[in-house]
Amino acid sequence: MVVAAATTFALNGTVSKLLIQGGFDPPQLTSFRAAGAFLGLLAFILATQGPRPLKASRQELPRLIVFGLVGFFLVPMLYFVAISRLPVGIGLLFEFTAPAFVALWVRFGEHQQVRRRLWVGLGLCLVGLASVTQIWAGELSLDGLGILAGLTSAVLLAVFYVLGSKTVTTRDPLTLTCWAFGVSAVAGAVVRPWWNFDAGLLLRSSGGYPMWLLGLYLIILGTIVPYLLITNSMQHLPPTSVGIIGMTEVVLASAFAWVLLSENLNAAQVIGGSILVAGVILAETARTAKAGSAPGVHGPRDEDRRRTGPQGMAEVPPT
């Protein structure tokens, strides 16, 4: 289930880039995805559980709003900005550095003990980032704004993990994600009002594919289905394992972009990406048992993952 989810999420990067090339801008695409996912999840919940699980108290609303704004609006929007200016695989790599920032917060913000491998992992992350950006060339070989957007999305994703693990603890992952996408959809309507949306965009094509088909993939197979797969996988695997296995998304996303978008990475970037992934895995597994429940690896998807099932699980992505 994790590999299947990683595969659909990975193809989602290429689909998102095709939608951007077809006329969507990142805020508009974020709003479109959030609104579609919200409506899909809302319909699923109402059909299977009724409206009762969606009820939220007045005290809970501020936390849900912050949770949705940070993790489900700002993070994906910045990721879309990154992949609009960078190869998909590299944009995803920047976002995947979030667990390293979480590990630093656990050590210095919460003063928890960590294993020594954390420092090795962070060192590998720096070496990997330097190799991916090829900073030794005297000037960045990648778009500066794209790099900034990718790293900012990683920092905000780390903030999302930390805030989510401390403030949203009483809601099941399905209704939590529905609420979060609803908040993101409202924020998107403010930034890019839906009544100004050019529906004619969906009648065009991008990369030889109909835009409406790409949009359906983004919402259904790129958001709702992989989220449900990840949530169910947490009945069988602990969150850290899910996060590490889910990092196959980086490799798959690069492969899809190479085949479908002709985005070729040079040898230094491939090696640097591999080193970066290894560093993130070391940093992610460096926390002691006391910190083991801290957030995981994947985007808005991970916070929910960590909230369901045994072992104190209750997921989330992502990416």
Image (cartoon, helix red, strand yellow):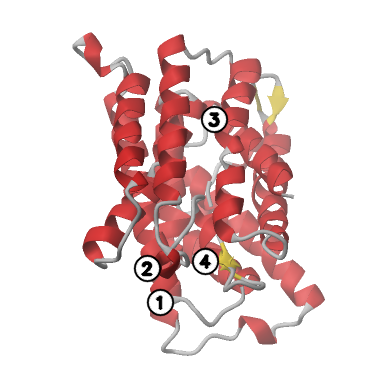
Disc nearer the start of the sequence (4/3): 3
Which numbered disc, 4 or 1, marks the residue closer to the eye?
1
28 over 296 or under it: above or below: above
Q: Residue at x 64, y 55 (%)?
A: 36
Q: Residue furthest right?
A: 48
Viewer-closest of 94 and 215? 94
Q: What secondary structure is found at the residue carrying circle 1? A: helix
Image marks 2 and 1: residues in contact by CB distance under 8 Å = yes
Q: Mark 1 points at which residue?
A: 167
**Spatial distance from mark 4 to mark 3, Cα to Cα?**
23 Å
Viewer-closest of 12 and 35? 12
Which x, y percent locates residue 14? Answer: 60, 29
Which numbered disc, 3 or 1, marks the residue closer to the eye?
1
Inspect the image, locate mark 3, and give the three-letter code of the amino acid beneath it. Lys
Q: Can residue 292 be seen in this view?
A: yes
Disc nearer the start of the sequence (2/4): 2
**Spatial distance from mark 4 to mark 1, Cα to Cα?**
14 Å
Which x, y percent locates residue 283? Answer: 39, 46
Q: Which residue is drawn at 67% across and 72% down?
A: 309
Which x, y percent locates residue 103? Answer: 34, 54
Q: Mark 3 points at which residue?
A: 17
Identify the mark at residue 180; answer none if there is no mark.
4
**Spatial distance from mark 2 to mark 1, Cα to Cα?**
6 Å
Which x, y percent locates residue 55? Answer: 59, 86
Inspect the image, locate mark 4, and give the three-letter code of the amino acid beneath it. Ala
The total number of labels drawn is: 4
